[in-house]
Image (cartoon, rainbow, N blue to C red):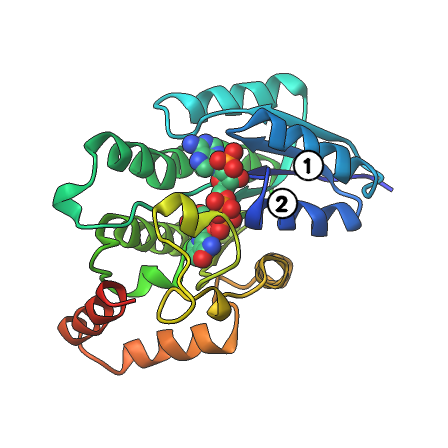
């Protein structure tokens, strides 16, 4: 069997590790990229016992300018041909926009927008030349409306959604498929690192979160079924659909009520 290779960013935990687990079961070669070497090493050790393919990892801080180019060069030097790129690494910064540390915002936007864009460009160019390949970008249900107190994060995810949908059209005639997964609240480190304390009830309640394995499966099914934009879970689909029935100012007002009084 000829193994294909997937590159997953943010593969040391959360959704990224779940994508890796599912692909490992299918025998893919995996290149895990992420910020914390220890987490990547542990993930690689686990996945090597599952996949019949190779598992390697690259430590990279994708919130730094120039890191997407460094990651691309390292992958090329390793000789791996990436058939599937999953742009999963992403963070949120929660709070009143005017009070958020500028350096945190800048790092988030470099990670969520700039380096996702540059990685998509480099790897999609190679895929286009070969005449096949897949990209999966991780946006959010926050992509579909303004989200007060998550203003810049939600806007960064709107970017990912629109960028992915446009890129999919650019590449559709060249054998390269682009999909975009828009998760709602999902169990992971996302909330803790965004500065949202676990509360037992309300909008951010841990009880309303989907399992990351379920969410990752929806994303990978979209990739292999050639679907463009997918939203996992009935509740998330209902919320996004309800959004379409309202006006943008009303959506922003409802959103503010939910995030300001979680
Ligand atoms: N969880 C949710 O409710 C939710 C909802 C909608 C969308 N999403 C999106 O889903 C994606 C995955 O998030 P998650 O929920 O799995 O959260 P997570 O558990 O916090 O995972 C984020 C991953 O990204 C990596 N990462 C963070 N900063 C990085 C950097 N500067 N350079 C390289 N890697 C970095 C993390 O590595 P370290 O662990 O080493 O920091 C981790 O592996 C993100 O794009 C997020 O915006 C999540």
Question: Toward which corner of the image does residue 121 lie, by quadrant?
Answer: top left
**Considering the numbered disc 2 on the image, is that residue within a helix, a strand or a loop?**
helix
Residue at 28% in and 34% down: 104
The tag earlier along the polypeptide, 2 or 1, is 2
Residue 73 spot, x, y in % from top left: 53, 19
Please tell me whether residue 116 is drawn above or below residue 210 in the rendered image.
Answer: above
Residue situated in front as seen by the camera: 225 or 97: 97
Question: Toward which corner of the image does residue 63 lie, by quadrant?
Answer: top left
Quadrant for the N terminus in the image: top right
Q: Respond yes or no on whether mark 2 lies under 8 Å from ligand 1.
A: yes
Question: Which mark identifies residue 17?
Answer: 2
Residue at 29% in and 78% down: 244
Question: Which mark identifies residue 104?
Answer: none
Quadrant for the C terminus in the image: bottom left
Residue situated in front as seen by the camera: 219 or 128: 219
162 vs 95, left or right, is: right
Residue at 34% in and 52% down: 157
Residue 153 spot, x, y in % from top left: 29, 49
Farthest residue, direction right: 1
Residue 142 spot, x, y in % from top left: 33, 61
Residues at circles 2 and 1 in contact by the CB criterion of under 8 Å: yes
- Spatial CA distance of label 2 from label 1 is 7 Å
Q: Respond yes or no on whether mark 1 lies under 8 Å from ligand 1.
A: no
14 vs 31, left or right, is: left
Question: Which mark identifies residue 43?
Answer: 1
């Amino acid at each position: 069997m000829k193994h294909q290779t997937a590159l997953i960013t943010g593969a040391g935990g959360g959704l990224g590790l779940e994508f890796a687990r599912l692909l490992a079961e299918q025998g893919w070669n995996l290149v895990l990229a992420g910020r914390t070497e220890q987490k990547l090493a542990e993930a690689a050790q686990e996945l090597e016992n599952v996949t019949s393919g190779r598992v390697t990892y690259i430590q990279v801080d994708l919130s730094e300018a120039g890191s997407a180019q460094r990651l691309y060069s390292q992958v090329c030097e390793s000789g791996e041909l990436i058939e599937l790129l999953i742009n999963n690494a992403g963070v949120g910064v929660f709070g009143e926009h005017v009070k958020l540390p500028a350096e945190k915002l800048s790092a988030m936007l470099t990670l969520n927008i700039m380096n996702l864009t540059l990685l998509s460009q480099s790897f999609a160019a190679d895929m286009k030349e070969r005449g096949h390949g897949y990209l999966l970008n991780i946006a959010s249900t926050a992509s579909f409306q303004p989200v007060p107190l998550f203003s810049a994060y939600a806007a960064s995810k709107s970017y990912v959604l629109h960028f992915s949908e446009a890129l999919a059209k650019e590449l559709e005639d060249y054998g390269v498929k682009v999909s975009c997964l828009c998760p709602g609240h999902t169990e992971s480190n996302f909330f803790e690192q965004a500065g949202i304390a676990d509360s037992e009830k309300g909008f951010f309640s841990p009880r309303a979160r989907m399992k990351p394995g379920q969410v990752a499966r929806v994303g990978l099914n979209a990739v292999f079924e050639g679907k463009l934009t997918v939203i996992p879970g009935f509740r998330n689909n209902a919320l996004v659909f309800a959004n379409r029935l309202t006006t943008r100012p009303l959506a922003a007002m409802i959103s503010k009520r939910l995030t300001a009084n979680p």
